[in-house]
Amino acid sequence: MENKKVIDALTKAFPGKVTEVPDRLGDTIVRIEKDDLLIIMDFLKNRPCEFTMLLDLTCVDYLSSKGCFEMVYHLFSISSNKRIRIKSEVRKNELDIDSLSDLWKNANWLEREVFDMFGINFKGHPDMRRLFMYEGFEGYPLCKDYPLRKRQPKIPLRKITK
Amino acid sequence: MNRIQKEARKESLLINMGPSHPAMHGTIRIMLELDGEVVKNSEVEVGYLHRGFEKTCEHKTYFNLLPYTDRLNYVSPLINNLAYVMTMEKMLEIEAPERAQYIRVIMSEFSRISDHLTALAAMTMECGAFTVFLYYIQAREEIWNFIEQTTGARMTTSYIRIGGVRADLHPDFKGLMDKAIKVTRRVLKDVKGLLNKNKIWIDRTRDVAVANPEMAVNYGFTGPCLRASGVSYDVRKAHPYLVYDQLEFEVPLGDKGDNFDRYMVRMKEMEQSLKIIEQAVEKMPASSSRAGLMAKGIEPDEAIKASRTKKAEERVNLSPNLQGSEKDVRPDILVKGKKYTVPPKEDTYTNIEGLINHFKFFMSGHGIRPPKGDVYFSVEGGNGELGFYIVSDGTDKPYRLHLRAPCFHIVSALEEMIKGHYIADIIPTFGSTNMIGGELDR
């Protein structure tokens, strides 16, 4: 029932912009357009929903089947003890999406990880660099077209700057 | 060029801490901009332990990737097993038998204690309390002895399996378990006496690296670090899994969110975990195996010989690393159905159906094939909410597997936490975040 409340509030605030995804396991899943991401996330973070915690942020590569990446956000509300999963598609021809780092501080690193692994750009991110991989790494390792055992070229020794 | 090199003022000193620094356990690099001994600004660089866990998992079957989860948080591997396995169970819509659930609770609580013991041992030792370190590690040793007795390994356990656990508890588990509980209690009491009112310890940890509740929630803190800030959120209470809703325990909270609170919350949590273990052992249903655990049977080669002429009925002695998973023990510890679990070894050795089931389970393209869809499930790990997000495309390999590592979020707040403090304060702060390279860098 609680699930319904959140989705009702969302569809009331953003008519036509939110699609509920039915889930056989009973999780609350919502699909939105990437242009509406910031306003919907801002709405969810504040009252009445109070999803104050960004639990997780990740990406799935569907390039071969649907021609897009799918961003997956997990939010958690401590006050109502609810989780919600928000999905948004990022098309192949424009690999960017708004950054959430103004709303949640841990989005900074999480988005850097997604940039590192999938090559998606986050508009408005303060420090868009690779997180785990080094400077000079070629390709995006978690994409499906990146082979498991691909070798990387040797990078030259870095110059010492004063 | 790093961010800090661009941002730093000309007159300040830039210095590297790590990646190979004795206090940066688990390779992490912190670049510091210093004014005298005060940290003006800093940049944390991670990834030195990145080994492509998620990419590797996409190329392994659901059954085969289990050992990789041991290597995530290597001080509490059993909870990592549990998180992955329970995510799979949610996806497959199966539930482990009751005895297996109690065993899982016991194992995950012992892992939690060993996680907290290790975290605090490192934190205290780096502040100079070497005695405390030795005490903590002694208690951890007893816990690992108990874990080793049942699972056969101290760290890389792979003990909790999809559908249950790999083997029943060792027949003599009570002895080592009681000893582990007794030693841990004694150590907690001793450490309390050594540290709780210790001037040096309090001076070094009180009001250092304060994370107020808003900041903790905004950074996605979970586990002891969040509770130290006074926010009551524990996955075991909020979304009860296994049999946690039938066990009584409290969720200890801190009030300030500084290093001392993070220490206190972990200390109190260990006491609660001991309480949970004692209740779980009391409530655990007895094994229904008629022969008793590890009863003597015939040797495997005799069984194979006998099975050539007629169906072998006797119990077969399994090799030591399979003991406890005998056919008559399995209903207590594993779900029914050949789809989700490795078929009993006795059948594999002695009859053709068992052999076929065995191959059907391990052959590529067969084995565990969950229905299409995605699932998120989390358990309370040593560091906080440990969650798996798995996308299945209907084959026997995950399409995408993502780990929500609790210490990732906590370490991302380190820059803010150490700002304005002394270099010496970085050490206990870093210790209190309990950064584990294996799960942070994946």
Image (spheres, grey):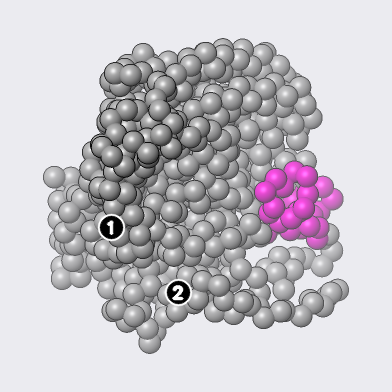
Residue B79 lies, in percent from the top left, at 46, 38
Q: Is residue B229 above or below residue B214?
A: above
- Left or right, B437 with respect to A12, comes to right
Q: Which residue corresponds to mark 2?
A: A143
Q: Quadrant of residue B25?
A: top right
* SS of the residue under disc 1: loop
C-alpha gap between disc 1 and disc 2: 22 Å
| Disc 1 residue type (three-letter) | Arg
* Disc 2 packing (10 Å; few <14; some 14–19; many ≥20): some
Using the image, name the chain to which the residue with label 1 belongs: B
Using the image, name the chain to which the residue with label 2 belongs: A
Q: Which of the image's four quarters has the N terminus of chain B?
A: bottom right
B325 or B388: nearer the eye?
B325
For the image, the number of numbered tags is: 2
- Left or right, B83 with respect to A89, comes to right
Query: Which residue is painted at 35% across and 79% down in the image?
Result: A63
Q: Residue furthest front?
A: B309
* Disc 1 packing (10 Å; few <14; some 14–19; many ≥20): some
In the rendered image, residues at marks 1 and 2 fall on the same chain: no
B13 or B45: nearer the eye?
B45
Query: Which residue is painted at 74% across and 68% down in the image?
Result: B5
The segment highlighted magenta reads B14-43
Query: Which residue is painted at 58% across and 60% down in the image?
Result: B51
Tell me if residue B184 can be seen.
yes
Q: Which residue corresponds to mark 1?
A: B369
The answer to if A148 sits in the magenta stretch is no
Query: Which residue is painted at 26% across and 37% down in the image?
Result: B310
B185 or A145: nearer the eye?
A145
Residue A119 lies, in percent from the top left, at 49, 76
The answer to if B39 sits in the magenta stretch is yes
Q: Which of the image's four quarters has the C terminus of chain B?
A: bottom right
| Disc 2 residue type (three-letter) | Cys
